[in-house]
Amino acid sequence: MTTSFETFLLLSPEITLFLAALIAYLAAAFSGFQAGWLIAVTGLGIAISLSGSQPESGATISSGPITIDGFSFYIRLLTYTAGLMLALVQSGDYWKAAVQDNDAEERRRVTGEEAGTFLILLVGLSLVGLANDLVLLFIGLELVSIPTYILLALKRTDAAGQEASLKYFFLSLVASALFLYSVVCLYGLGGSTSLPAIGNQLQSLGCTIAPIADGSIAVGTITISMAAVLLPVTLGMAFAGAAFRMAAVPMHFYAPDVYEGTSTSNTALLSTLPKIAGVVMLSRLIALAIPPLGSLQNSGPVAETLLLQSWQVIAIIAAITMTVGNCMALLQNNLRRLFACSSIAHAGYLLVGLAALAAAAGNRRVLLGGESIEETALSLNGLGSTLFYLATYIVATIGFFGGLTYLGHRWPEWSTSSDKQPQLEEIKTVDDLNGLSSTNPVAAFCLATFLLSLMGIPPLAGFWGKLSLVTSSLSVDSGNAVFGDRKAWFIGLSVVLVLNAAIAAAYYLRLITAMYFKSTDKGVQADGGLSSGLAMIVCLIVLVSISIRPQGLFNSALQAGNTLSGTLVAETMALFTTNTSTASNTLIREEIENEIR
Amino acid sequence: MSPSFLLILIPLLPLLAALTSIIFGRRLGSRAHLPAVIGLASAAVVALALLVVTVRSRGTAETPRPIDITTTLWQWATIDNAYVPAIDSQAAVPGVAVGEDAYSARPFSISITMRLDPLTATMLMIITSIGLLVAIYSIGYMHGDPGYPRFFALVAMFVFSMSMLVAASNFLLVYIFWEAVGACSYLLIGFWFQKPEAAKAAKKAFLVNRIGDFGLAVAVFLLWLTYGTLDFHDTFSSEGTILPGILGQTRLADVGGYVSGIVGTAICLLLLLAACGKSAQLPLHVWLPDAMEGPTPASALIHAATMVTAGVYLIARCTPLYMACPGALVMVSIVGTTTALVAALIGTVQNDLKRVLAYSTISQLGYMFACLGTGTLLGFTAAIFHLLTHAFFKALLFLGAGSVMHSMGGVIDMQRFGGLRKIMPVTAVTFLIGSLALAGIAPFAGFFSKDEILASLHSKGWPDVHHSVSNQHHATIPTIPSPHSPRDTIHNVGYREITGYGQYLEGTHVPETVGIDALNQPIVWQTLFWMALVTAGLTAFYTFRAVFMTFTGPLRVPEEAGDHAHESPSVMTTPLIVLAIPATFIGFILFTTEGLAHFLAATPSFTAPSVVSTTTASVFHWDLAIQGTLAATLGIVIAAVGHLGRRSDGPQLERWLGPLRSFLENRMFIDQFYNAIIVKPIKAIAFLTALFEKYCIERSVRLIAHLPLTLGGVVRRLQSGLLQRYALASVIGVLAIIVLLAWRL
């Protein structure tokens, strides 16, 4: 567990990005190089190509404080791909140029800083996924937060923008502080900062069979009763940290205000990247209680309690979060505010899969204890579903905001007699989209597709995501549900999810109605950068590809999820995985091929 | 290039053409036809290559073998353990999944699978070649229309959907593309949506088709519940056992593989309902005549040659299902023959040239259904044979009518023009060829296919006459043996005892019967034969009535045409000439060589033991040929008496019909009948439910809808914008979680 040269080799994508960030900063400052985002895109391209291919479920490379396995690989690639799209969106956001008269020069000058800061943010996020150690995890999270403050402040310099960045700054500090508290508690429980060591300690606490200690520094003074006191605090605080990043209840308050106050491209960033961090935090926390892949070790009562408490609290929060988010969104007219609320709701959907993960993992003890395996079919694919849903959500959201950024501003009404050209108006309310299908049919089509996917309309990607979430939630236990038992809980959670999807349709459809069925006397002018239009098109292509062939991404997400969720995975039957091949007679086919030759 | 690759290319090329037209259509302007024409031309070439490959691989004429090549492009989605077969269900085919596997859970998989067999190859050839000719013709016909790019995009999209429909190897995909061709048809009927009649006709076609689609949907549900799969082909489960597809080799080889009785009959009748909707059979035929409001090339392509034959295709594809239910088979014939006769009767008094052709299409499709219902190999091949010849000569007739309409300034009422042979010689000659083929005069294409149809009906009505013949030409088609040794496990013996299929083994099979099975009597078939023969005479009559009224007599041109009525441009007449060639020769060639019959016999659906053991002979029956030709000649003579020459425009003949004429002119009041017994009551019910909805449901819904809004209002209070409050609320929330965890959980 020492840092070596290999560690740096494994971190080469992150180091590349860091160097790219330095170049962007320095080039902008000293030689006046203006294409900061070009450096960002190039750096991301190199970083993605350096990332290699996804390791098998069992294969884990740990070096120093980082670990590369199926899960962290998935997170890393998701981060960089999302980052690539976001970089395109960001570079097309001409907020200042349009709103402030003589600021074109100014805007150009800061792109280097923006791009560099953005790259640092991505490095931080990738480190969160790779972290095998609490310290690195926390540093990674801060490396996400701090660049976010800067980006929020850089992009939009009016009062609303400054207010938003300050709000985000202070509330983020509160969340970080709470999470740090939980890190301290975890250290107290596990006696180490290394995640595997903490996990080992947690699982072996109170366990009858002596664990095979693997590099853990067992602190002898911890007892089960002490753990019972520490656990709720640990979980609650850690949950607060993750909830802030995912914009889940009860840390969701900042979202509408901050999203509204910042620029469109930053909204895209805020509603996607921190969610990845939140999902990683919670899955790593739950994984502490799950024995690593291939180990036949039993978990002790403390780990069981952790799983039990996590799935219950996550399930409750998930239900509340989606309902609150969707109900708030119904009342919004400001597009970014509306999407803040919808982002809260999607955080709730994501939590459903995590709850299923924790619940299903808790089941394992019974199974391994020698009971009949056929009695309860397990669903450990909760995490896989969440990761899949996360990807589909990110594609649709970035695409949508890419489209909005591309549309940018429009001319307000002004009389042709006056010479003075008026200030451009930003597209920010639902009504501003009126009649988009006639003024810009391509953008309207793309936006509508993204909205339908977010709504979960088959056969779009969002539908497969919601389907896999519901499936994973429903397959937590087999057999008949009895009121109050776990099965009933998860059936209830699925029902809430489906009802919420129906509520969400109301406000998404409102946008589509505005675009397609209302007319406007004001034209929408696409004055945003072409690069954000490109991001929109690319997202559409990706979304449609996922829609017609969801299997590839799903298998990848499942493999990533399986890495964290333990040994029984190989036996788990999961959505999209059956290898069904045709049994036509190959004999004839071969003969025909011969004849053609 | 492998056949699979060619197979994928055929739908792909029109799809690319359609997308190109949609995206760049406006830029291309008057050259917007290029993507569609190029795409369809290459698709037609590929289809021809595929046909050649398939023909060459079918084996010799004496020992043909089933051709069944499937290509799975990808799994769309798979839901595991979706279906657990019940002990006595057909999903556990005896001998297929041995032992415990027979009842193990199966996945619900939507696989994007395409198949290649003789039936598909033939259909693809028809679709792409006629699609290409229609696209070329439309360059002239649609010239200058504001929706020029839209038209070609729709035609290409239609060819894509239709070729996917016939190439899909999964009932769900069939359903999807069944809807897709319906959508294309809707958009093309309503192509001139500014015209209220066109919009209304499109709506009518859509609504009537919904009834059929409902049948198909329910049939698909029942198939899933009965067979536990929706695939045509066999698939392997992840453990390597065979999951028998509905029309896969494994199930086909099994005598008791298909469910009969009430469930089987229900499935077949629902599929028949679906086919009736798409193929405009009684009682759902009412949409097709109105569909003539669309552009004429679209009518030729969709509402004459290809889409309307989807019903014939579906039933032919599902042959083994029907073979287990004799009652459903008879129903197919009864529906078909009745439709043929009724449509022909209505067609005799129509004055709108396109409507005559529309009723003729309905009538000819009825013929195809009639012989499909005979349940013999002869009947099935005759149906596809007639489908093929009909596609060519009916497309020819429609394009000819379009040419007339184009030159007459959009007028299509036959009473307002006449003697057009003088100004439109090419159109007149090609139209005459098409009419001879439709009327069934030797040696034109329709004669041979109609002869086979009559023969198939005759063989059911007078089975003794044909008995000796059928044995001589009996072609045995070996089916591929099931890889599992089928009949040796105790398990299956138990299964047989439960269901009674075991009697197959002893050869004392008493199938489960339902009420309509009793219709399968020689007397019924004899009636159907006579009805078909009368229809043949009527067909010749109304066809030549149209020919005489349009092309003979003194030259008369409506004022809409102006003074420049002329032959259509060569881009329109060339497809006419090209189509006239198959309309003349294809019947003779395919009949004398027996190529089509033997080729089609290698289709998996026709290799089920129940089909192979039936009449296969396609010998020439002098007695039937003479009867058919006599009927047709009689029809032509009556038409000539009424309308040839100077009398071309007069309604002399119809006058004799008296009150019957108005009955027929009003289309037997079927539309009015539907209006009275279906539309009006539904409207009444709708009115009542509207009241209920307004006063009861809407209020409660509003109440429910207010819940989220109210909740949103409450939650919004918390969004005060004050940072301190946010922080406080967050911390309180976190504390609440911790307290909850520590205290309760």
Image (cartoon, rainbow, N blue to C red):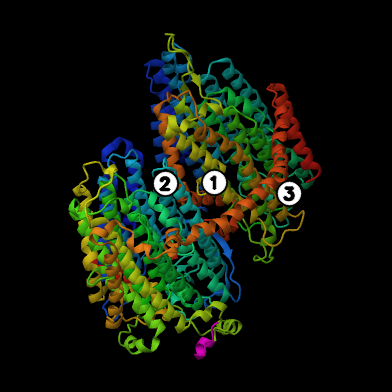
Task: Quote the CA–CA distance across marks 2 and 3.
Answer: 65 Å
Residue under label 2, please give it. B190
Q: Secondary structure at mark 3?
A: helix
Query: Which label sits on residue A574?
Result: none
Residue B132 visible somewhere in the drawing: no
Circles 1 and 2 in contact, beta carbons < 8 Å:
no
Neighbor class of circle 2 (other Cα within 10 Å; few <14, some 14-19, many 20+) is many
Span highlighted in magenta in the image: B503-511
Q: Amino acid at mark 3?
A: Thr
Q: Is residue B409 left or right of residue B206?
A: left
Q: Amino acid at mark 1?
A: Ile
Query: Which label sits on residue A305?
Result: 3
Residue that appears at 33% across and 61% down = B652
Asked which quadrant contains residue B379, the reply is bottom left
Residue that appears at 64% across and 47% down = A498
Chain under label 2? B
Can you give x and y, in whole percent of width and height, for residue B400 in the image?
26, 55
Closer to us: B243 or A507:
A507
Task: Quote the CA–CA distance across marks 1 and 2.
Answer: 27 Å
Residue B513 visible somewhere in the drawing: yes
Asked which quadrant contains residue B445, the reply is bottom left
Task: Single out the mark in the foreground, 2 or 3.
Answer: 2
Task: Single out the mark in the foreground, 1 or 2.
Answer: 2
Answer yes or no: are tags 2 and 3 on the same subunit. no
Residue under label 1, please give it. A457
